[in-house]
Image (cartoon, rainbow, N blue to C red):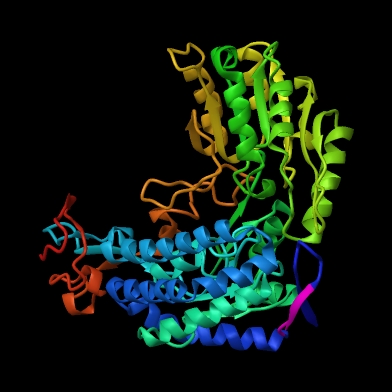
Amino acid sequence: MTIRSYNPRTGQVNGTVEEMSRHEVRAVVERASGASSSVATASPGQRRGWLHAVAAALVANTAELVELAEVETALGYTRLTSEVSRAVGQLRFYGDVAAEGSYLAAAIDRQTGTTPGLARVNQPLGPVAVFGASNFPFAFGVLGNDVASALAAGCPVVAKAHPAHPLLSDRLTGLARTALLDAGAPDGSLEMVVGYDAGVALVRDEGVAALAFTGSQAAGLALWRIANERRTAIPTYAEMSTVNPVVVTRAAAATRMEEIAEGFVGSFTLGSGQFCTKPGLVFAPAGAAAAGAIGKALRQASPEPVMLTEAIARSAAEGLEELRFAGARVVELVEASVAGWCAPAAVLEAPIDALRDGSRLLEECFGAVAVIVEYADVAELAAAVDRIQGSLAGSVLTADEDDTDAAACLALLSPKVGRLCANDWPTGVAYSWAQQHGGPWPSTSAPWATSVGAAALDRFVRPVTYQSLRDEWLPPALQAANPWGLPRRVNGVLQPLGATL
């Protein structure tokens, strides 16, 4: 089967790629499996070198990659150039995290008169299947966070080319393969499959040890089921966006509603509303005229939402109608005037009692669409928040001065999100040591995990304890000489970086 690449601004075909057969997928997984031991036993410092080499390849080819991404995604040259820089930074960051070594959680208990010698360390799972996102072709694509963190953790990767940007996926994988081989990584460290059926075959292949996914709930849950129905079930880390609630306190609405409205519009229309962290449901105090203020800000902003694919554009328009059918009223609607795969931007309002279990109002509408709900008091707000789904992120907007409702509102949202913002918008996700990009079900399939930040490596390792082994039989991370120079905990005491026994 031939897969076509389309230009979202025109609907014209950019080119084609061929879908892989089940047998071709099997061969790809076999190559990754063949590289698994070599990737796993390479030192963290070696893996850092590999990832830095891939980053250098992106830097050297930025102009070409941005040009290709623009015709496949219509995300704009400025945004895409910035995203390449982000991907470069991510690759280097995860390599540095690996080299620092604390993700291995190496711990050694010396033998005593009553207990044996024990040594525990995290070890790579094996080949990881990665399904990247449509909306971030560099930062969450075939060389994005999941791929970089899995390689950093010592796992070969088989990435699936995204149908929204198949030509870019192919080019990126080719560049990365060359860079990895030139840097000394084994053949099979990074592979790619193409096509819907090929993706299903990849998840079902018993050679795959873990699955990472970024995208819609429908697709994520489908892959999660397949991964759990295999003969050998595998860990599935599916990041599936949801409504990402916002709460405006009474004091904030009274003192700066116009400013909040402008900030909210900038956030929920960013990237045509195609962010997994897009805030989509606002709780504002009754009488604050929040819907009117946000509608006015949207009208003044006049965004032109060009969507990534024809299917996403259609889904956004259908989602808007579904929200109306579920009890929401359109406050402001901005129709796109440009050609291509577009969808309207809209602000709607709904009564708080319409937020019932199972309501469409509690689900994400992927696009520049947001729903505003008014609450009478904190008690009514609490009851409504209790009914919303788990989300990746949430925000509480407070007054500049002491706000008596701030702490209560933050406490209400905290159990519902993986990242909680105060007087800030959630649409930016920094890759850093403290980042958490994951939340309660169904925003992710593994609420304790993150797909962005240093802890992302934790998803692709498992702990193994060695009992009564001679030093030379232990993995390098646990040997007395500490050849990898890792931080380790010995008899419960954290040792300085690189300390030997």
Residue 231 inside the magenta-drawn segment: no
Q: Residue at x 53, y 47 (%)?
A: 438
Q: Nearer the viewer, residue 420 or 67?
A: 67
Residue 310 shows in the view:
yes
For residue 356, what is the image quadrant? top right
Depicted 309 relative to depicted 217: above or below: below
Depicted 102 relative to depicted 304: above or below: below
For residue 468, what is the image quadrant? bottom left
Residue 358 shows in the view:
no
Indicate the position of residue 32 as horizontal and vertical percent values.
51, 82
Q: Nearer the viewer, residue 102 or 172?
A: 172
Indicate the position of residue 26 as horizontal and vertical percent values.
63, 85
Indicate the position of residue 464 as horizontal and vertical percent values.
35, 65
Query: How many callouts does the rendering have?
Result: 0
Depicted 446 relative to depicted 164: above or below: above
Characterize the magenta stretch by its predominant secondary structure: strand
* In-image side of 59 versus 291 (left or right): left
Image quarter hosting the C terminus: bottom left
Q: Residue at x 72, y 26 (%)?
A: 296
* In-image side of 420 versus 93 (left or right): right
Depicted 206 relative to depicted 11: above or below: below
For residue 52, what is the image quadrant? bottom left
Indicate the position of residue 146 as horizontal and vertical percent values.
51, 63
Q: Nearer the viewer, residue 223 or 245?
A: 245
Image quarter hosting the N terminus: bottom right
Magenta stretch in the rendered image:
13-20
